Image (tube, coloured by chain):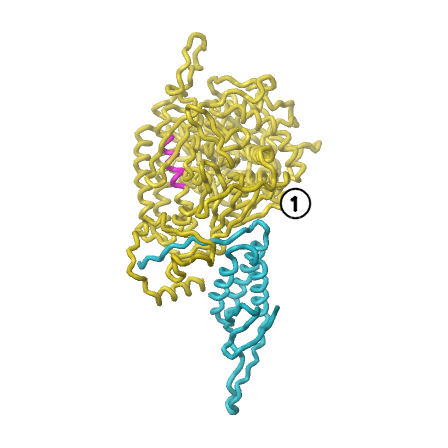
Chain colours: A yellow, B cyan
């Protein structure tokens, strides 16, 4: 503030000499780096915009402090690494806090259970697009992870004999789908995410991680294909910070805010995906966006699947429990994509509820009120505040709403980020790791089962910490980094800070959100998607015409929102382009013009005598998308799914089959 | 080595090599009848805190390249804030303390700068 006043006063006095300086838009090479105070002869003080850059050196840097980020950060500190955790929000404000449902683990407290049945359910839920080695790792570690959380002090709901209460959840079955509904979702009433995050935060205070709170990570520092750290903007005082380290873990969460109506917080802007895209690395499976069946109509707030797990049912305008027709066995507890599609079909066929017949009802008033009070207190309150509904008397109006991104940064089962070439296959990017919703391991494949995400966070957060502990030792010397590393990020920051076009950030954002909502929704058609791709491309070009208002550097939220918009746009163009190219229906991506799943063999018919299709001709493969940030052009490649589990004897891989509930 | 001396122009010399211009508004006044200029020049509590913070910053920034010039620049720029604007000064003081903790941290290594020639708009 005073600094800006002084600078402007100084500038007003000095007149710029007649040096022909190129236009601002080409200023990406115009920044000059030097150690502060020395060698400033090229640029005299009064005539330059200066961005002080503080350099830090750590053994490991974690970007993001949600469930996965905190678990990775204190896992690393526990292993003796000097760790920094860079986050744009205070840890307990990360979006993990909003998770309601629970965390799946085959503990067997309600009935006999086996993690191999959980493995089968997850593989089936992912519509055979999940990598079975990662799923094996996650489901085998699940009971251990939940017991570890319980030992950290997480206040799980309890059964009569003091064991962790497990409720029914969508897509969970016993005996490989043949034994009926399984009860394996460990929960804390209906605020599991809140408890999980607060437990992890409390636990993390025991270790000596350095937290850099309210630091917005701008970009990765990449050199020769290796990740050497992160560059971030301190929002409090406007200084730039470069965190050099041998290991960087990205745990920045998803990008729900690309859609107009979503259950995500305003801060879910896909920063990690965008950082990786700008570094030239691919993102995986971004077209798979999960629509949660029960988001409150209008507000978009989440009503957990746990309601249906406790016995809630979905009804249409005729009062019929319509899920019995779409999923005869699992009924309301079918997989989320099945339920979302069913609700959308009911509305489309004219059996929607309300004056405009555009939503469905979730009925809970047939359940005993004390069960609602003990097991579902949070949603009772949410329904009252956002829908004005008393759940003990009336049903809640619900609509499928964007909730989760199955896709993200591609990693192997150990949490290391990978790229893929057809000649060499999967190749690890040294120094870069990812976990949580930002990563795509891929345990969720084409559709995520409820309560698997919180499990994903803790298991892979811990896995990243373990992998780093295996590969490196604390206190290793860092490889040299170019002194002007991060220059483009600062140039971009400078460009946005003084942007003076015609369109405001909020206008461009709303255009993007409405386009995505209209063109890449639950049911997608080729023509509508193509139109959406063209519109998104046009909107991407309008980013050059952006206008910001706050020219300061201290707490410039206009600048931060614009940076977030850039990140959202990169995610949105990849999502809609990948969706347009994928010509099949699988999991959460359902096409009206290509209603079937296209695998290498037709699993609806007997397999004997069928010829296996080559990978170019079927769609059971991961999409790898890259973007040229200057033009917004998306390039797509594909990568095969990993079909073998970690140990074929302990847990046999599940061959693809027809998916029905 | 500390040597504090006050000159009429209001410059405070703290270390033998450094001169910090503290725009201390002197509570001195010209007496209406006598030609003597009374100078009291005692620092207020807040001024003492700011000076102490400055000293701590200088000590902490000694071995790390790039920090000392920046510290001096920042304090110099902010010295023009009016003595009465206590809210602003306290805000900067709290921010400075957090920045000092970060500077003292063993992982902070150096301060650089990206500078761009300013184009007349």
When asked about the image quadrant of residue A300, the answer is top left
Which residue is at a point 43% across and 22% down the rendered structure image? A620
Does residue A97 show up? no
Which residue is at a point 50% across and 36% down the rendered structure image? A437
* Residue occupying the far bottom of the picture: B33
**Image vertical order of residue A328 relative to residue A97, above or below:** above
Label 1 secondary element: loop
Q: Toward the viewer: A246 or A596?
A: A246
Please state the horizontal and vertical placement of residue A187, each as a whole percent of the image. Answer: 60, 35
Please state the horizontal and vertical placement of residue A94, each as a whole percent of the image. Answer: 53, 44
Tell me the magenta residue range. A568-578
Residue denoted by label 1: A206
* Residue occupying the far right of the picture: A161
Please state the horizontal and vertical placement of residue A299, each as a whole percent of the image. Answer: 45, 42
The magenta stretch spans residue A572:
yes
Please state the horizontal and vertical placement of residue B7, each as a whole percent of the image. Answer: 53, 78
When asked about the image quadrant of residue A270, the answer is top left
Chief secondary structure of the magenta portion: helix
Which residue is at a point 38% across and 66% down the rendered structure image? A9
């Amino acid at each position: 503030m005073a600094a800006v006043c002084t600078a402007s006063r100084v500038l007003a006095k000095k007149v710029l000499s007649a040096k022909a300086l190129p236009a601002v838009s080409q200023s990406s090479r115009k920044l000059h780096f030097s150690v502060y105070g020395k060698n400033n002869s090229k640029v005299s003080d009064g005539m330059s915009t200066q961005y002080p850059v503080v350099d830090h050196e750590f053994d490991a840097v974690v970007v993001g402090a949600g469930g996965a980020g905190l678990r990775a950060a204190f896992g690393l500190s526990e292993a003796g690494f000097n760790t920094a955790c860079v986050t744009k929000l205070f840890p307990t404000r990360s979006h993990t806090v909003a998770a309601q449902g629970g965390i799946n683990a085959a503990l067997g407290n309600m009935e006999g259970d086996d993690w191999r049945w959980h493995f089968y359910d997850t593989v089936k839920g992912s519509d055979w697009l999940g990598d079975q080695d990662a799923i094996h790792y996650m489901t085998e570690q699940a009971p251990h992870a939940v017991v570890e959380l319980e030992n950290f002090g997480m206040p799980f709901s309890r059964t009569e004999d003091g064991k962790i209460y497990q409720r029914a959840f969508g897509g969970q079955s016993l005996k490989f789908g043949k034994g009926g509904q399984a009860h394996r979702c460990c929960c804390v009433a209906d605020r599991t995410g809140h408890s999980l995050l607060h437990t992890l935060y409390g636990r993390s205070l025991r270790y000596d991680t350095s937290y850099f709170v309210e630091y917005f990570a701008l970009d990765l520092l990449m050199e020769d294909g290796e990740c050497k750290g992160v560059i971030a903007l301190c929002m409090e005082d406007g200084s730039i910070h470069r965190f050099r380290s041998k290991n960087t873990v990205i745990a920045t969460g998803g990008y729900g805010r690309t859609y107009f109506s979503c259950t995500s917080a305003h801060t879910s802007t896909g920063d990690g995906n965008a950082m990786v895209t700008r570094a030239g690395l691919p993102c995986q499976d971004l077209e798979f966006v999960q629509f949660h069946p029960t988001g409150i109509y209008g507000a978009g707030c989440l009503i957990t699947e746990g309601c249906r797990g406790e016995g809630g049912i979905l009804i249409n305008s005729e009062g019929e429990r319509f899920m019995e027709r779409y999923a005869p066995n699992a009924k309301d507890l079918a997989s989320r994509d099945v339920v979302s599609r069913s609700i959308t079909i009911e509305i489309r066929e004219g059996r929607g509820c309300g004056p405009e017949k555009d939503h469905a009802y979730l009925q809970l008033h047939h359940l005993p009120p004390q069960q609602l009070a003990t097991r579902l207190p949070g949603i009772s309150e949410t329904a009252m505040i956002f829908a004005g509904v008393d759940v003990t008397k009336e049903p809640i109006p619900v609509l499928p709403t964007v909730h989760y991104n199955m896709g993200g940064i591609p990693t192997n089962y150990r949490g290391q980020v990978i790229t893929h070439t057809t000649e060499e296959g999967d190749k690890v990017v040294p120094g870069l790791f990812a976990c949580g919703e930002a990563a795509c391991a891929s345990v969720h494949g084409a559709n995520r089962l409820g309560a698997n995400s919180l499990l994903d966070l803790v298991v892979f957060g811990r896995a990243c910490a373990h992998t780093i502990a295996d590969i490196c030792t604390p206190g290793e010397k860092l490889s040299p980094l170019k002194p002007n590393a991060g220059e483009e990020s600062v140039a971009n920051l400078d460009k946005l800070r003084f942007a003076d076009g015609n369109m405001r950030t909020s206008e461009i954002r709303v255009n993007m959100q409405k386009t995505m909502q209209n063109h890449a929704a639950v049911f997608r058609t080729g023509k509508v998607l193509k139109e959406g791709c063209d519109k998104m491309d046009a909107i991407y070009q309008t980013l050059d015409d952006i206008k910001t208002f706050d020219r300061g550097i201290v707490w410039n939220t206009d600048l931060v929102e614009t940076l977030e918009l850039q990140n959202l746009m990169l995610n949105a163009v990849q999502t809609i382009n990948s969706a347009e190219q994928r010509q099949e229906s699988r999991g959460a991506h359902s096409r009206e013009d290509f209603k079937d799943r296209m695998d290498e063999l037709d699993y609806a018919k007997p397999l004997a005598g069928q010829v296996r299709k080559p990978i170019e001709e079927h769609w059971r493969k991961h999409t790898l998308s890259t973007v040229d940030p200057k033009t917004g052009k998306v390039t797509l490649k594909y990568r095969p799914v990993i079909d073998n589990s970690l140990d074929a004897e302990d847990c046999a891989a599940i061959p693809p089959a027809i998916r029905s509930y | 080595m500390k040597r504090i001396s006050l000159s009429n122009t209001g410059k405070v010399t703290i270390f033998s090599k450094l001169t910090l211009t503290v725009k201390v508004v002197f509570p001195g006044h010209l007496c209406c009848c006598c030609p003597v200029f009374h100078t009291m020049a005692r620092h207020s509590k807040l001024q003492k805190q700011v000076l102490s913070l400055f000293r701590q910053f200088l000590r902490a920034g000694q071995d790390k390249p790039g920090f000392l010039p920046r510290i001096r620049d920042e304090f110099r720029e902010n010295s023009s804030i009016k003595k009465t604007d206590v809210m602003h000064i306290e805000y900067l003081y709290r921010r400075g303390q957090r920045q000092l903790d970060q500077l003292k941290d063993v992982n902070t290594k150096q301060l650089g700068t990206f500078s761009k020639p300013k184009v007349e708009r």
